[in-house]
């Protein structure tokens, strides 16, 4: 069957799963030529097998809130593809979570993890639980109830979850505590752990740092650097924080952050104090950035707007999927933006990516430029199995090296005849080849 037929069948089989179909469409479009040139993939039905998860686990999570009321949420873990290592990927707690969103994230994770050079398969999970406004005790009870269902399905050599939207160090702590109580062992079953009990230095910063290291590599292909560049960042969570820290350290001026309520424009640029404040805002569990404007005079809050309307050199979308559409992309390009580096997963719509490619600006897809998070999770797994801790410098150097390797892989498979690098194509082909060839080696299973 050719790629178009496979896609049509998939659309018929999973109608309405729009994020999942969007992610699959992008990858299959990139690998179509390679697939057509290598009949062994069609013979082993590699694409039909790679687009469907190995298994999807769904469960009910019941817990008691602070008022004594019973609450019911849905929990999921998708073990998508284990060809190159244990299933690996984050958990997302957000009211929007559904099967389509987790399938898109799990599918992307397969290729992202393959690009890291480390042995990790692809997985994702989460719940429609809304952390907004919840007390610490409620978060703890929910995490414990979630792990009560999940624990028997995961393990350090089987499936290793981590954080994503709504799941950070606090949640990983509560999840780990319950896993340990049930399994009666300390293992590297989760990553993003606290430093005192098996976590890795640099993991909290890793996704944002990696995104900026990848940005540096892209700029270097044009003989350029971050110094003096104006940067728009969206989001104000874990990834946005790490990206703001590293970009600022390297001499760029970060002029925006955003939340679901709107965005902040701060022409003076973020500094250490403002970046710390960003963390405080996030920790309130309220998901609003508006208070920043009162705290730091000279900055302005634009309610209900996105940062992409500002004139900047570089845009780093670090919030959520499909947050940057065709109109936003046209505004960025018209204002002279030279680079868009995705920190979030699939933040740009297909139309936006087309605008970036048509205008030949530097554009990196999340599966390449945000891979530093899961790569450092992989480094945490290695430290756990060796029962040792690396220094900050050691982890950071390994992360930096991995981001350079991912960039090189994108350039290898994505450079066109005119020299323009299509990083989407490069990342998808490099990731696909590693996973597809591993599947061939292991037979029809
Ligand atoms: P966080 O929970 O720390 O922060 C994300 C926050 O952004 C959410 O609370 C959300 O608020 C907010 N947000 C949602 N929509 C918008 C919007 N349109 N504009 C601005 N803010 C918005 O999550 P992370 O920083 O961990 O994740 C951010 C992105 O990075 C996600 O796409 C994630 O999949 C990706 N990622 C994360 C990695 C990690 O290691 N944490 C690794 C690689 C990728 P609300 O809840 O109100 O919607
Ligand atoms: O999207 C991602 O790569 C993550 N949320 C991190 C996954 C991980 O296992 O560290």
Image (cartoon, rainbow, N blue to C red):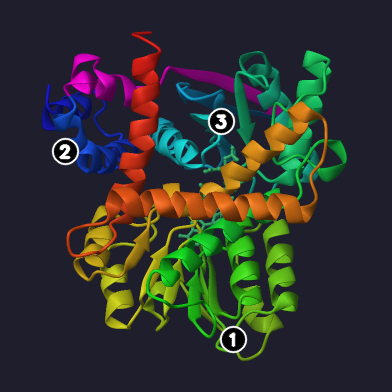
For this view, does 183 lie left or right of residue 312?
A: right
Q: Quadrant of residue 192?
A: top right
| Residue range corresponding to the magenta coloring | 39-63
Q: Tell me, yes or no, whether the two marked residues, 2 and 3, touch with CB atoms within 8 Å.
A: no
Residue 195 vs 400, above or below: the answer is above
What secondary structure is found at the residue carrying circle 3?
strand
Q: Residue at x 18, y 65 (%)?
A: 418
What secondary structure is found at the residue carrying circle 1?
loop
Q: Circle 1 is placed at which residue position?
A: 299
What secondary structure is found at the residue carrying circle 2?
helix
Q: Quadrant of residue 64?
A: top right
Q: Nearer the viewer, mark 1 or mark 2?
A: 2
Disc 3: residue Cβ within 8 A of ligand 2's nearest atom: yes
Q: Circle 2 is placed at which residue position?
A: 33
Mark found first going from the N terminus, 3 or 1: 3
Disc 2: residue Cβ within 8 A of ligand 2's nearest atom: no
Residue 345 in view: no
């Amino acid at each position: 069957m050719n790629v178009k037929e496979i896609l049509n069948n998939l659309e018929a089989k999973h109608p309405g799963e729009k994020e999942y179909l969007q992610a699959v469409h992008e990858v299959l479009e990139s690998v179509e030529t390679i697939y057509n040139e290598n009949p062994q993939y069609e013979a082993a039905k590699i694409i039909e097998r790679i687009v469907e998860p190995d298994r999807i686990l769904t469960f009910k999570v019941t817990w008691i809130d602070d008022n004594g009321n019973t609450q019911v949420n849905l929990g999921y873990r998708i073990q998508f593809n284990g060809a190159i290592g244990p299933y690996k990927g984050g958990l997302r707690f957000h009211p929007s979570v559904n099967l389509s969103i987790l399938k898109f994230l799990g599918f992307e994770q397969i290729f992202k993890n393959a690009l890291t050079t480390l042995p990790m398969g692809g997985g994702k999970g989460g719940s429609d639980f809304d952390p907004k406004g919840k007390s610490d005790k409620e978060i703890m009870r929910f995490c414990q109830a979630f792990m009560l269902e999940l624990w028997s399905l995961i393990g350090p050599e089987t499936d290793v979850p981590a954080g994503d939207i709504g799941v950070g160090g606090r949640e990983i702590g509560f999840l780990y505590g319950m896993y340990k109580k049930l399994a009666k062992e300390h293992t590297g079953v989760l990553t993003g752990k606290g430093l005192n009990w098996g976590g890795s230095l640099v993991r909290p910063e890793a996704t944002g740092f990696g995104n900026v290291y990848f940005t540096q590599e892209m700029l270097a292909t044009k003989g350029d650097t971050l110094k003096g560049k104006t940067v728009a960042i969206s989001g104000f969570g874990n990834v946005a924080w790490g990206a703001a820290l590293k970009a600022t350290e390297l001499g760029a001026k970060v002029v925006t952050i955003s939340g679901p309520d709107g965005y902040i424009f701060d022409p003076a640029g973020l500094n250490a104090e403002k970046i710390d404040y960003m963390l405080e805002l996030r920790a309130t569990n309220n998901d609003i950035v508006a208070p920043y404007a009162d705290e730091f005079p000279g900055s302005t809050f634009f309610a209900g707007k996105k940062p992409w309307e500002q004139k900047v050199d570089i845009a780093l979308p670090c919030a959520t999927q499909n947050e940057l559409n065709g109109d936003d992309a046209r505004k960025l390009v018209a204002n002279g933006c030279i680079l868009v580096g995705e920190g979030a997963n699939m933040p740009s719509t297909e139309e936006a990516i087309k605008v970036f490619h048509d205008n030949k600006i530097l554009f990196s897809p999340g599966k390449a430029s945000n891979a530093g998070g899961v790569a450092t999770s992989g480094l945490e797994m290695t430290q756990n199995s060796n029962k040792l801790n690396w220094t900050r410098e050691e982890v950071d150097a390994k992360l930096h090296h991995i981001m350079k390797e991912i960039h090189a892989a994108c350039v290898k498979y994505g450079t066109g005849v005119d020299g323009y690098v299509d990083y989407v194509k490069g990342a998808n082909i490099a990731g696909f080849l590693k996973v597809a060839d591993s599947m061939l080696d292991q037979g029809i299973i």
